[in-house]
Image (spheres, rainbow, N blue to C red):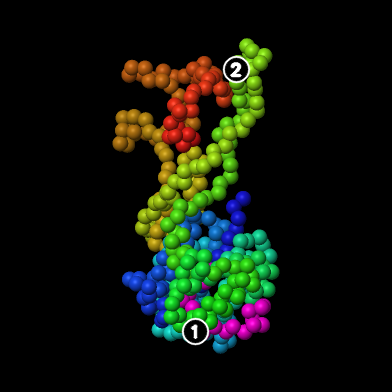
Amino acid sequence: MTEKEATVYIVDVGASMGEKHKGRSESNLDFAMTYVWDKITSTVALDRKSALLGVIGLRTDETANELESEESFENISVLQEISNILLPDLQRLRDQIVLSNVNTGDAISAIVIAIQMITKQCKKLKYRRKIILVTDGRGALDADPSSISEITKKITQDDMELVILGVDFDDPEFGFKEEDKDPQKAQNEETFKALTDSCDGIMGTMQAAVDELGRPRLKSTRPTPSYKGLLTLGDPATYDSAACIDVERYPRTMIRRPMSASQFVQRREPAHDDAQSSATVLGDGDVEMPDADFGDLSNVKSSRAYHVPDATAPGGKKEVSREDLAKGYEYGRTAVHISETDENVTKLETQAALELIGFIPWANVSGAVLLRR
């Protein structure tokens, strides 16, 4: 069974995120969003109902959160409640995540809101809980030791994972250290480092996270045997010395195919007949359910129909049901009917087997052969 996930992204959109550093042609916000958009769109492409996302804007011009009445939670906005992200939500987020005109807003308070969102959504159910903060570390922090201790306790107690990715943060493992660092930023990095260390979280530089996107992503799948049966060496029916072993064969690696694109069309206004029922019965007993909420788009659905020539029918063809069809073989310009009983005669009886019939020198084996399934 697929594990349930609840992830909250905290995106710093403060005015300082509009600056460009380290020779980059893009702003710090655009650089950080390279990672965030990749992660969000990958989750959307999976189309898993058990993968939930939420987005919080840090250092926003406005304030929109459940704790907005308290001063320390100003300039923090919940842009997306934890839910399944659909294409219209993704388009709306792209319009909302823009640079603000302020530099005020506490990242620690944003983490508190993220914890509250996850707790409200997941309750005591089994979820993989994760908070990802992307920031340049230039805003003032409310680093009260008692507050940090309570946050650490809650994160550990609810088994949440805290990841803090900073633009140009020092990262010894990645081999990066920013020279002439702003004192405020240096102090914030120390606070973030102490927070992640106390709750077994992760803190790193954004460049390392962006570089990681270029590596192939592995996907763990449930092992499915490609063969179950006997492995034989020799003919057991002829030789008593023949070896027979019960084996199961599994592929060690599989090719990960690109995600297939879904097909959509512009949604039309429902006609009077369409509004009579929330589901439509198709041929062969299939049921067409109402469209999911994709905004102005609607899923493209497929159905299959069978026709035979009929001069009396409109268009010269008559539709027939699947139950009226019969199997046959084309013979010249005619079709020879074959019943299910006769069809068994034409089937060749086979059985799965894995037999060693001989050996060849290793030097004669091509490496490409070993890569095949």
Residue 223 shows in the view: yes
Image quarter for residue 336?
top left
The Cα atoms of the two marked residues, 2 and 1, are separated by 77 Å
Q: Is residue 273 left or right of residue 234?
A: left
Residue shown at 61% from the left, 71% from the top: 197
> Three-letter amino acid code at disc 1?
Gln
**Mark number displayed over residue 234:** 2
Which class describes the residues within 10 Å of circle 1: few (<14), some (14-19), or many (20+)?
A: few
Residue at the far bottom in the pictured view: 71
Q: Is residue 218 left or right of residue 199?
A: left
> Three-letter amino acid code at disc 2?
Gly
Q: Nearer the viewer, residue 207 or 372?
A: 207
- In x, y percent, where is residue 172? 51, 68
Which residue in the protein does label 1 denote?
184
Image quarter for residue 357?
top right
Q: Nearer the viewer, residue 89 or 174?
A: 174
Q: Is residue 135 magenta?
A: yes
